[in-house]
Amino acid sequence: MKLLYRLGFYLVGFSIGLIFLAIIFKGKKTSCNYGPNDRVINNISKKTWKQNPMIPTAFDSIAFQNFLDKSRVDFSKSDTQKEDCKTYFLNGYWSDKPIAVKVENCDNSVFLLQLIYRTD
């Protein structure tokens, strides 16, 4: 019988805790970006996006945001040791075509340096 009382008290406290968490985090844009890929994508998506005028493409800011939602960072090709603007290679899909994008992530903005159409 004591086990049932303990289990009952535990479940009551646990459910009250869940209700408090739901109230506290309701409407807040919280996310768990603990992985290196998620942190880089989150950082890039918060900044203003600028395109190199030498790259002819219909890649606008909305298309860039959609691309970021489904992209992965290739850290083996990226240069993350720079102090001012780090360079990242992002692999993903745009209009159901595989592409790779080389971006320069600076303090206030992100510059599109290169757009590569992949064949895989």
Image (cartoon, rainbow, N blue to C red):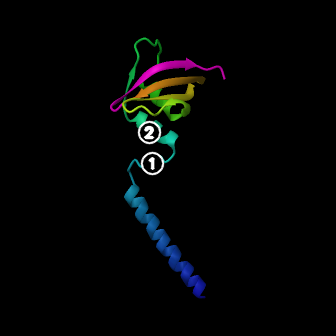
Q: On the image, which quarter does residue 77 sit in? A: top right
Q: Nearer the viewer, residue 115 or 22?
A: 115
Label 1 crowding class (10 Å Cα cut-off): few <14, some 14-19, many 20+?
Answer: few
Residue 51, position as x, y percentages in the image: 40, 19
Q: Amino acid at mark 2?
A: Asn
Say which residue appears at 38% left-offset and 50% top-offset. Answer: 28
Quarter placement of the C terminus:
top right
Quarter placement of the N terminus:
bottom right
Q: Nearer the viewer, residue 47 or 17?
A: 47
Say which residue appears at 34% left-offset and 32% top-offset. Answer: 107
Disc 1 is placed on an element classified as loop
Above or below, 33 against 79 in this view is below
Q: Which mark is residue 31?
A: 1
Residue underneath mark 2: 42
Disc 2 is placed on an element classified as helix
* Segment colored magenta: 106-120
| Alpha carbon distance from label 1 to label 2 | 10 Å
Label whose residue precedes the other's in the sequence (1 or 2): 1
Q: Amino acid at mark 1?
A: Ser
